[in-house]
Each structure stands twice: as structure tokens, then as C-alpha cells.
């Protein structure tokens, strides 16, 4: 019993939050109406998205302001999948495309489309990362490039209307109806997304603890020093960007069926900055922060807009300002800090009492 | 019989006409502590930059175990030729624990493949523990590097350099900003490293130099002014003159 208590004291505070959240999310469909479950399902996709950026920004220190591009790539693959089930959709025929273009054919199977929706952003991240990181572009310049990318990508999707339906986006996406069968119910789909979210979270936890994760943190802390130890930081950065891209794609793949649509609003600069704000509020570099921030902000957003239809954005903006101004580490970051400080103070007290008898040592 | 590990021949570098290091000859014996002193701007740090590949020389050779490493890539010099360097001022990973700082610096796991297959085996743990004891930070292993005192941060970086298992360790002002007690402790730490490792130390604090030096080289305006044991160098009239001239110098 004493051992359990002892280990509980050493467990980081965010692990408790994780467990409470997990139980809450598992029970959630039992306590609320179905449309709330649908909302939570969407937010869980955002959680995966936020986790993917947390690996890149929180752990590696690379702030991307265009991460929704990778998310959108995933989302559009699934969206397109359900557009081409019965011949060329109207947005294609209207522009004179009577046949489904050959490069869309592999998307016809939802499972294949899901896989492509993960692989394409990963490959894209690999190509982009290879260019950016090999040419020693660092810090804010990476951020600026990704910002420009978000705008370019959005414009591109709007411009190739006959392939993407432009800014109207893709509607009527089904929750993984395979082989013409029935789509998944809202509740089963919620649990499917929750299950994948848990897997992603566990993967991120493993990653953070692994040596690659530690190298990522070292890149954030002091890249020049790391390279002097013989590491090639750019290789690691590319790898992490690819992993992050695949996870963002996965989030998009799950998101589109959850809302049954995807539009250019989900892939531009606004969407990319939103996820940065979620992580900033929750706290970056500890995973739990990304989850907490995403859920709090999104729920706050929808509940506020239900009750204060006209000025909810003002309230939310003020709250965000206060949080970022007063706790720059984010909610979970602040809690972890507090716990760490208390532990260290206790330890110092014990050390002091141990050495107080010896006298001189304590002064050093 | 002592043997030469590092032999520098006629090494020069100039930055747009300014000769930071010119025609320097230097040889460092294996297992010894070689201290380099000199007034500010004498070219000490530049010399270290040349050895570690951070700066490319305009002329001359740096023979390491008989191979010329002048102008080679810093990463290669660190890993292949096993030269570790502690920079001026603590240069550590602030928001990581002391333990993680040492762990990242461990030699032999720098490629992506190795990073994936790395495990905290008993052998690795034992090695990290040994280093932490050497630098007297074992009790602080779970603290963040940023929470350490200045002196302890310097030691942490020395520990990180040791973790690379280098043959040659370069310490750039390891005792800078330390209290007298810390400086003395650092000196003892450095002395324990000699033998297994070879050390080049840049330092201003003369008590510290006296405590650790096997050989002292005095640099002045990019050139070697004198070389010998601490006692010999101390008596050298030219060295005394240079140090008295230099108002920033600590003097003897």
C-alpha cells in the first residue's frame, strides 16, 4: 500500500487528468444527447490533429502555421471518395469532366482512401521537410513558409474547382459505408474515433519517451549543441515532420465523415492558427495539454455561441488573452510546473535536514 | 614516455585581414592537461574553433593521431575523431532533466536507426550514473538543467562532454563565474579526467591553472608567446610584461 502511495506521488499530474478524461469520454455518450456526441466526435478528431502539431511544435519547437494543409489532405481524400461512388459528381460534369479522372480511381474504396489520406500528407511533409530542413531554414522562417503554404493550398483547392468543388467543399460524406453497405451509426463511430484517439495518444506518449522524442526536445532546446554531439538535426526534423503529417492526415480522414463534409474553411490559415491556440491554452509539450486545450476551447466556442450568439467571440478572445498572458505555459503546463516545484522544494528540505548535521556541506 | 596526441603545425587563420591565429605550433601529450592562457583576444577560442572544425584554417595542419583534421566537418570531428568540447558559458538543454542531458550526449546513438533501437539497459544506466557521480550531480538528476546553479550547469556540460567518450576534451573556461569553492572542485574534477582523456583547457583564473596544468601555453595576439610548466611560464619576463600591459588581464 505504501508503495502505491509512493508511486502515486511521483506520477505526473497530467497522467491523472488523462485517466479522468478517458473515463469521461468513455461514458460521454451515455449521459448526453446524440447531437452532443456528434460534436464530441468532431472534437476528438481535432484532438488527434492537435497532438500531431504538439509533436512538431511542443516537442521539437517547430511552429507550423499551415498544419491544416496536412489535415485537409486527409479530409479531402475521404470526401472525394464519397463523391465518386456513382460516377462523376455534378461539380465535375458541370465543368466538362464526364469521366472520373484516373488518379481518383484508387479513392473509390473508403479504406484505400483512408490509407491514401494518411500517406499523401506524410509524403508531402517528407518532400517539404527535405527542402526546408536541408537548406537550414530555421525558427521563424519555417513558420512563415508554412503560413504561406496554408494560403497557397487553400487557393489551389478553390481554383481547381472541377476536381474539388472549389470553396463549396465536399458534402454528403458517409461514416465509412463500405461496399455500398450502411454507414456506421453516430455512437459506434464516436467509439471508433475515441479508440483511434487513444491509440494515437499512446503512440505520442511512447514517442515522447523514446530517444527520438528526446532528440526532438533537444532540437527545441539547443539545436547547435546537439549537432556538436554528432547528430544530424535535419534528419530528425524531417522524420518528425513526416510522423506529424501522417497523424494530421489521419485526423482529417476521421474528421470528414464525422461532420459529413469538408470545405476550404477547414484547411486554411484560420484553421491552422486555431489549432495553435488550442495547444497554447492547454500547454505544449506534454500531450495532455493539447487534448485539454482542444476540448476546452471547442466546447467553450460552441456553448458560448449557443448562449451568447452575438458576442461570444469577444468573451472567448478575452479568456484566451488572459490565459496566454498569465499562464504562458498553458493550463496543464502550469499544473506540471507547480507539481515539479513542490516536489523539488520537498526534496531540498529533506536534503537539507540530512546534511544539516554535517554542517558545512549545506552551505555549498 | 609520453606520446603526442595532437600536433598543430604552422596554423593560421585570418578574418578579412585580421590574423586571429598566426603560425601557431603546439603539441599536446596524450593523457595530460594542457592549459592555454592569454589576454582577451589572444586567439584562444579561435584556436579551439579550428581544432573542432567550427572555423576553417587559412593555412597549416592539425595532426590528430597523425591524421590532418584541419577543415573537416564539426560533426565528423566530434564523432569520428572523438574530440569533445565544452563551450564558453554553460550550453546545455535547459528544459530537460540532468539525466536526459547526459543521456542525449551518450556516444553511439546519434543516427535515427540507433535512436529507435536505443534502450536504457543496465549498462547504459551504470554509465550515466558513473558520469553523474563524477560531476557530482547524481542527487540532482531529476532536476531541470535550468534549475541548477551556474557552477552545476558548467559541470553538467562537462558531464555531457564525458558522455561522448572523447579522447580529447576541450574545455573553454570551465570555471568562469564560479565561486572559489566551486572552482576548486572543478579543478579536482578535471584532474580526474586526465590520463583516460587528454584535455585542453582555456582559463583565466591563475589559481585554477596552477591547480590543474601539466603544460601551459601562452597565446598573445594570435601567436605562441611562451610554453612550459606553470612555474616556468610564470617566471617568463615576456609573459609578465604582456599580462601587465593588458589592463583587462587578471595578472599573476
Image: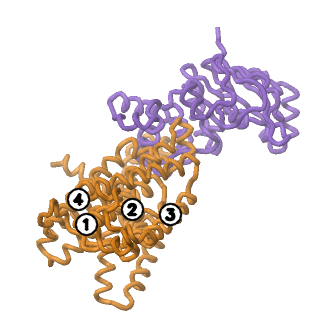
Residue A333 — which label?
2
Q: CA distance from mark 2 to mark 1?
A: 51 Å
Taking A192 as reference, is B16 above or below it?
above
Q: CA distance from mark 2 to mark 4?
A: 39 Å
The disc, 2 or 1, on the residue closer to the chain's N-terminal end is 1
The disc, 1 or 3, on the residue closer to the chain's N-terminal end is 1
Q: Residue shown at 42%/73% (left/top)?
A: A323
Residue placed furthest toward the bottom: A310
Q: CA distance from mark 1 to mark 3?
A: 32 Å
Which of these two is toward me, B84 or A158?
A158
Q: CA distance from mark 2 to mark 3?
A: 30 Å
From the viewer's perspective, is B1 left or right of A74? right
Disc 3: which residue: A149
Q: Are marks 2 and 1 in contact (CB under 8 Å)?
A: no
Which of these two is toward me, A157 or A138?
A157
Whether labels 2 and 1 share one chain: yes
Taking A86 as reference, is B66 above or below it?
above
Amino acid at each position: 500500500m505504501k508503495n502505491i502511495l509512493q508511486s502515486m506521488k511521483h506520477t505526473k499530474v497530467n497522467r491523472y487528468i488523462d485517466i479522468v478524461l478517458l473515463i469521461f469520454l468513455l461514458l460521454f455518450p451515455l449521459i448526453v444527447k446524440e447531437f452532443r456526441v456528434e460534436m464530441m466526435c468532431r472534437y476528438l478528431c481535432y484532438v488527434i490533429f492537435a497532438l500531431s502539431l504538439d509533436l512538431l511544435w511542443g516537442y521539437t519547437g517547430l511552429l507550423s502555421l499551415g498544419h491544416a494543409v496536412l489535415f485537409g489532405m486527409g479530409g479531402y481524400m475521404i470526401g472525394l471518395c464519397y463523391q465518386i461512388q456513382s460516377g462523376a459528381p455534378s461539380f465535375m460534369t458541370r465543368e466538362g469532366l464526364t469521366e472520373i479522372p484516373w488518379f481518383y480511381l484508387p479513392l473509390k474504396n473508403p479504406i484505400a482512401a483512408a490509407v491514401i489520406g494518411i500517406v499523401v500528407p506524410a509524403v508531402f511533409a517528407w518532400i517539404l521537410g527535405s527542402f526546408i530542413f536541408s537548406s537550414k531554414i530555421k525558427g521563424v522562417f519555417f513558420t512563415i513558409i508554412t503560413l504561406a503554404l496554408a494560403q497557397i493550398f487553400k487557393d489551389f483547392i478553390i481554383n481547381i474547382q472541377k476536381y474539388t468543388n472549389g470553396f463549396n467543399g465536399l458534402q454528403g460524406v458517409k461514416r465509412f459505408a463500405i461496399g455500398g453497405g450502411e454507414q456506421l451509426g453516430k455512437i459506434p463511430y464516436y467509439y471508433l474515433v475515441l479508440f483511434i484517439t487513444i491509440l494515437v495518444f499512446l503512440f505520442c506518449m511512447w514517442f515522447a519517451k523514446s530517444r527520438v522524442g528526446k532528440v526532438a526536445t533537444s532540437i527545441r532546446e539547443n539545436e547547435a549543441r546537439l549537432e556538436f554531439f554528432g547528430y544530424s538535426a535535419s534528419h530528425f526534423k524531417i522524420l518528425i515532420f513526416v510522423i506529424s503529417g501522417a497523424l494530421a492526415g489521419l485526423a482529417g480522414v476521421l474528421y470528414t465523415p464525422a461532420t459529413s463534409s469538408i470545405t476550404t474553411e477547414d484547411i486554411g490559415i484560420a484553421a491552422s492558427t486555431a489549432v495553435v491556440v488550442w495547444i497554447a491554452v492547454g500547454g505544449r509539450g506534454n500531450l495532455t495539454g493539447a487534448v485539454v486545450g482542444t476540448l476546452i476551447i471547442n466546447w467553450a466556442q460552441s456553448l458560448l455561441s449557443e448562449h451568447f450568439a452575438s458576442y461570444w467571440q469577444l468573451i472567448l478572445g478575452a479568456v484566451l488573452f488572459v490565459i496566454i498572458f498569465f499562464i504562458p505555459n498553458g493550463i496543464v503546463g502550469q499544473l506540471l510546473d507547480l507539481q515539479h516545484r513542490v516536489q523539488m522544494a520537498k526534496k531540498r528540505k529533506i536534503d537539507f535536514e540530512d546534511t544539516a548535521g554535517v554542517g558545512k556541506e549545506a552551505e555549498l | 614516455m609520453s606520446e603526442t596526441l595532437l600536433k598543430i603545425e604552422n596554423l593560421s587563420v585570418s578574418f578579412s585581414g585580421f590574423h586571429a591565429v598566426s603560425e601557431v605550433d603546439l603539441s599536446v601529450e596524450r593523457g595530460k592537461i594542457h592549459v592555454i592562457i592569454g589576454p582577451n583576444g589572444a586567439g584562444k577560442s579561435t584556436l579551439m574553433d579550428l581544432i573542432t572544425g567550427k572555423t576553417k584554417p587559412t593555412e597549416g595542419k592539425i595532426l590528430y593521431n597523425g591524421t590532418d583534421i584541419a577543415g573537416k566537418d564539426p560533426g565528423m570531428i566530434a564523432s569520428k575523431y572523438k574530440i569533445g568540447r565544452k563551450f564558453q558559458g554553460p550550453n546545455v538543454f535547459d528544459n530537460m532533466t540532468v539525466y536526459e542531458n547526459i543521456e542525449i550526449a551518450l556516444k553511439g546513438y546519434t543516427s535515427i536507426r540507433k535512436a529507435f533501437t536505443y534502450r536504457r539497459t543496465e549498462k547504459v544506466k551504470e554509465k550515466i550514473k558513473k558520469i553523474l557521480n563524477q560531476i557530482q550531480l547524481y542527487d540532482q538528476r531529476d532536476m531541470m538543467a535550468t534549475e541548477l546553479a551556474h557552477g552545476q550547469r558548467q559541470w553538467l556540460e562537462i558531464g555531457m562532454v564525458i558522455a561522448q567518450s572523447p579522447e580529447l576534451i576541450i574545455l573553454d573556461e570551465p570555471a568562469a563565474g564560479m565561486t572559489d569553492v566551486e572552482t576548486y572542485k572543478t579543478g579536482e574534477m578535471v584532474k580526474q579526467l586526465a590520463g583516460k582523456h587528454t584535455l585542453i583547457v582555456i582559463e583565466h583564473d591563475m589559481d585554477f591553472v596552477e591547480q590543474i596544468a601539466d603544460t601551459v601555453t601562452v597565446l598573445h595576439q594570435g601567436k605562441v608567446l611562451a610554453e612550459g610548466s606553470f612555474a616556468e611560464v610564470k617566471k617568463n619576463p615576456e609573459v609578465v610584461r604582456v599580462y601587465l600591459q593588458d589592463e583587462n588581464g587578471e595578472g599573476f
